Image: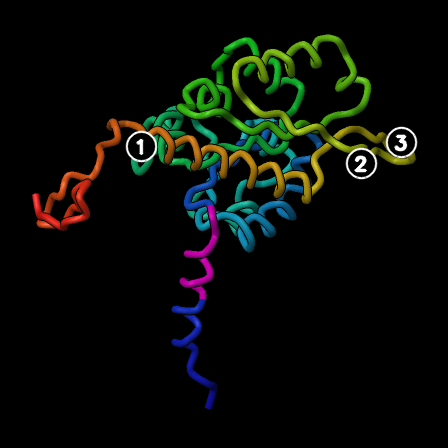
Amino acid sequence: MAPPVVDALPEKAAIMADLPCKDLLIGASGSIHVTYLSQYLLLLRRQFAQRIRVIMTRTATAMVPPATLELYTDGPVYTDLWGTNDMPCPHLRLTRSADLFLVLPASANTLGKAAAGIADDLLSTAILASPTPVLFAPGMNSAMWNSGAVQRNVRQLRDDGHYVIPGEQIPEVGTGDFTETGPGPTVDQVMSHSWHVLMRRYKEDYWAEATSTPPAPPSGRNGLPLVSTGGEARTA
């Protein structure tokens, strides 16, 4: 007889509860690096996020079928700006519930749209509607990354309060004997920057809540004793 597996469920739930990010939203754009996305999702699922939801651009879906990414996520992959019956207005509902919004990979086109405030598909609209700063993980060939236009867009995004991960040179998928290298986010970079941005947000949210009311000196409320200047205990 096979051993019972009921004990595995609480253990898994406990592990999930220990992960720092309750709700991670990932926006996948049409960079060739999207072909590596499942590797990132696997590690993020194990070490970072309790729940992962994904938005894909049309170009990204041409490189990786949404059904493949749904193996690593919670629920369907979102591609339609108009949403579904279960998720109307996804550009608002997904971003407002997310603890962290990570664009992975971020193509040159997506960086340009975000820097210019263009909202013509679900991903670009979600970026514009995000109530918190977005973390961008660019992936493209070196010629595009080093262009003046892309570097100008990166500066603009940072000036707007967003985060842009500086990529490392990694091989891109080539055709035949043609293989190009270009800056792209490593798994370690994605993990470390995601932790940093999330912890910074938690700190800022906590500080805003902690300082929302002015501090008050002890007043002996609830019958707690106070000590007078003469050393005698009294109750307010």
Residue 11 sits above or below residue 164 on the image: below
Q: Nearer the viewer, mark 1 or mark 2?
A: 1
| Element assignment for label 3 | loop
Q: Nearer the viewer, residue 193 or 221?
A: 221
Instruction: Select label 1 or label 3 by which is in front.
Output: 1
Q: Check disc 2 and give the amino acid type.
A: Ile
Q: Which residue is mark 1?
A: 209
Which residue is tagged 3? 178
For image coordinates 44% across by 72% down, the residue present is: 8
Q: CA distance from mark 1 to mark 3?
A: 54 Å
Query: Which disc, if any, is residue 170?
Result: 2
Separation (CA) of disc 1 from disc 2: 42 Å
Give the crowd class for mark 3: few <14, some 14-19, many >=20 residues within 10 Å.
few
Question: Looking at this view, is 12 or 126 the one in front?
Answer: 12
Q: Nearer the viewer, mark 2 or mark 3?
A: 2
Residue 14 is inside the magenta segment: yes
Q: Main secondary structure of the magenta part?
A: helix
Mark positioned earlier in the residue sequence (2 or 3): 2
Badge 2 element: strand
Q: Quadrant of residue 186?
A: top right
- Labels 1 and 3 touching (C-beta < 8 A): no
Residue 18 x, y percent position in the rendering: 45, 56
Front-most of residues 137 and 199: 199
Q: State which region is magenta.
A: 12-20
Q: Is residue 126 left or right of residue 34?
A: left
Residue 83 appears at what percent x and percent y? 37, 29
Where is the C terminus found, in terms of image quarters?
top left
Quick one: label 2, few (<14), some, or many (20+) residues within 10 Å?
A: some
What amino acid type is highlighted by mark number 3? Phe
